[in-house]
């Protein structure tokens, strides 16, 4: 099988998996406790890395842009630049990449281990559909958690930018906040939430698909985990480009 | 007179009803629990099963022998619908499941118990939750689940391990918990995929005894995939009976009874090279079979 055929087959299988998982959400039995447990593991469990990533990204944005803006006499626009960059791009993308690294790898490794130890076969043999029991709750948990984590990263990023601007560069607090207010529009907020929704779908389906297609024992688990993280990260970045353009067209901001 | 006629008529009708009942019962028993018809399965160019035909009758244990990579475990996966054949038909209780969707297979799987090679217990669940898995999925109330789980764990003599996690169990205990989990819901078909591989002889014997109890006391049809000859010796030469004190005892063939409901099938490279009783297997002249039996 050549590279293109394999790629198309993988795309087909991943899409079918996502479709089956979504159908599973509307059928009984509903796995509510599993979904809540996954939200805890994915959402609450990722809080620390998202807080740190958001805060320091906002801070470094100020560090990198303030001198340039100052040379143009536009240092009062630091808050504007930090807020726009974070809400439109860095918040959603960095959050998605961090969650891919932490959650995508964990999902893939867990499902892969279950495959090689025949737990997935056992589940099917006991009359339970692993897609509904394992994939659907993880996807739903990601769909709920990632937008919330992104909003948190945005807020903390702006806070990090404010702290740096005020303490390091003596920018007036009210000037910074006023610039942030001017920068963020409703369209930015819509885009900032739509993107994580799409990213969570990408991360969840790729991680679950790679985990469930694990072959070759424990070495295979390592391989599928690496593939899940690499593939999901690349697809997130590529999807971000097309989403940014699509949102500009749809929201009329181009 | 009329009373006599009435009485004899009612006796005849009772006899007719009884004979009809037996006829229905016998007819049902004549339908194989599992049947393979010309089943062919290949992965790319490699043929795994080549036009396989066999039946497992109700209450029968079919021991499938063969070396590694001979397609033994694949048979079990086909019965469960975990794999689909390229050609041929797989029937469970007379129903052709070959083209069943995953959703329809879920219903078929509910009447089949499966014991995996390493137990395949869910690591994140306790022994209790593992055994109760099928009942929890079906939404059975907890006050009905616990007695059933305890009954099954008693059957495999592991009631004390109810609160343990799988990681705390030995290999033999994991297999026995796997058997208990497979037997929840009293399935009439049980599939064993090399359940004694890597176990010490006494533990392997315990697993075989459980298979014999299912065959002789519960009327369960089963496929027992193995490559260990002592499994064959136990299952084909001993049977389980309930002794006078109510305990299950195992007697050797010929002591009181000689009607053990087990057949042997030997596979090599996806083909059946022998099918029959263990006695005729031992008499077979095929050099591969003789080498397999002697171990050299």
Image: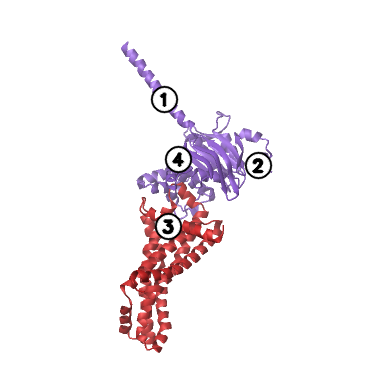
Chain colours: A red, B purple
Q: CA distance from mark 4 to mark 3?
A: 33 Å
Q: Which residue corresponds to mark 2?
A: B292
Q: Secondary structure at mark 4?
A: loop
Separation of residues labelled 1 and 4 (CA atoms): 26 Å
Q: Are marks 4 and 3 in contact (CB under 8 Å)?
A: no
Q: Quadrant of the C terminus of chain B?
A: top right
Picture coordinates of residue B78 (x, y %)?
Answer: 51, 44
Q: Is residue A35 visible?
A: yes
Report the mark closest to the observer, 2 or 1.
Answer: 1
Tell me, for residue B187, which label it has, or none: 4
User: On the same chain: label 4 and label 3?
Assistant: no
Q: Nearer the viewer, mark 2 or mark 3?
A: 3
In 3D space, how far apart are the residues under numbered discs 2 and 1 (Cα atoms)? Answer: 47 Å
Residue behind mark 3: A18
Return the residue at label 1.
Answer: B20
The quadrant holding residue A79 is bottom left
């Amino acid at each position: 099988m050549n590279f293109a055929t394999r790629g198309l087959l993988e795309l087909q299988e991943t899409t079918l998996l996502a479709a089956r998982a979504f159908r599973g959400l509307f059928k009984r039995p509903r796995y509510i406790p599993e979904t809540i447990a996954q939200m805890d593991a994915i959402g609450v469990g990722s809080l620390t890395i998202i807080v740190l990533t958001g805060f320091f990204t906002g801070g470094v944005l100020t560090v990198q842009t303030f001198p340039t803006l100052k040379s143009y006499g536009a240092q009062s626009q630091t808050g504007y630049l930090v807020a726009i960059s974070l809400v439109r791009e860095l918040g959603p993308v960095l959050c998605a990449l961090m969650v891919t690294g932490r959650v995508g790898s964990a999902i893939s490794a867990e499902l892969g281990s279950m495959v090689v130890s025949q737990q997935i076969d056992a589940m099917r043999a006991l009359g339970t559909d692993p897609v509904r029991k394992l994939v659907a709750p993880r996807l739903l948990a990601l769909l709920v958690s990632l937008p919330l984590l992104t909003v948190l990263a945005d807020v903390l990023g702006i806070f990090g930018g404010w702290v740096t601007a005020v303490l390091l560069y003596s920018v007036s607090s009210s000037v910074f906040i006023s610039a942030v207010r001017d920068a963020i529009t409703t369209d930015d907020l819509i885009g900032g939430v739509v993107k994580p929704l799409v990213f969570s779908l990408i991360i969840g389906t790729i991680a679950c698909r790679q985990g469930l297609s694990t072959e070759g024992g424990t070495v295979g688990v390592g391989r599928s985990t690496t593939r899940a993280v690499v593939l999901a990260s690349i697809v997130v970045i590529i999807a971000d480009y097309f989403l940014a353009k699509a949102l500009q067209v749809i929201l009329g901001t181009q | 007179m009329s009373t006599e006629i009435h009485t004899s008529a009612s006796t005849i009708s009772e006899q007719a009803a009884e004979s009809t009942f037996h006829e229905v019962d016998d007819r049902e028993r004549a339908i194989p629990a599992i049947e393979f018809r010309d089943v062919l399965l290949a992965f790319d160019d490699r043929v795994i099963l080549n036009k396989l035909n066999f039946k497992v009758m109700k209450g029968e244990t079919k021991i499938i022998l063969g070396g590694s990579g001979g397609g033994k475990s694949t048979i079990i996966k086909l019965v469960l619908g975990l794999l689909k054949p390229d050609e041929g038909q797989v029937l469970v209780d007379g129903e052709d499941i070959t083209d069943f969707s995953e959703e329809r297979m879920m219903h078929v799987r509910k009447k089949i118990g499966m014991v995996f090679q390493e137990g395949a217990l869910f690591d994140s669940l306790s022994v209790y939750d593992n055994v109760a898995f099928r009942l929890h999925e079906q939404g059975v109330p907890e006050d009905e689940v616990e007695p059933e789980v305890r009954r099954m764990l008693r059957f495999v003599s592991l009631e004390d391990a109810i609160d343990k996690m799988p990681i705390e169990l030995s290999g033999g205990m994991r297999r026995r918990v796997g058997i208990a989990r497979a037997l929840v819901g009293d399935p009439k078909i049980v599939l064993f995929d090399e359940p004694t591989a890597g176990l010490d002889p006494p533990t392997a014997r315990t697993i075989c005894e459980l298979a014999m109890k299912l065959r002789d006391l519960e009327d369960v049809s089963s496929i027992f995939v193995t490559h260990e000859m002592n499994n064959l010796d136990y299952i084909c030469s001993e049977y389980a009976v309930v002794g006078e004190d109510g305990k299950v005892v195992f007697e050797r063939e010929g002591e009181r009874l000689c009607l053990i409901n087990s057949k042997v099938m030997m596979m090599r490279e996806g083909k059946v090279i022998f099918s029959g009783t263990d006695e005729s297997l031992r008499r077979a002249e095929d050099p591969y079979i003789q080498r397999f039996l002697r171990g050299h």
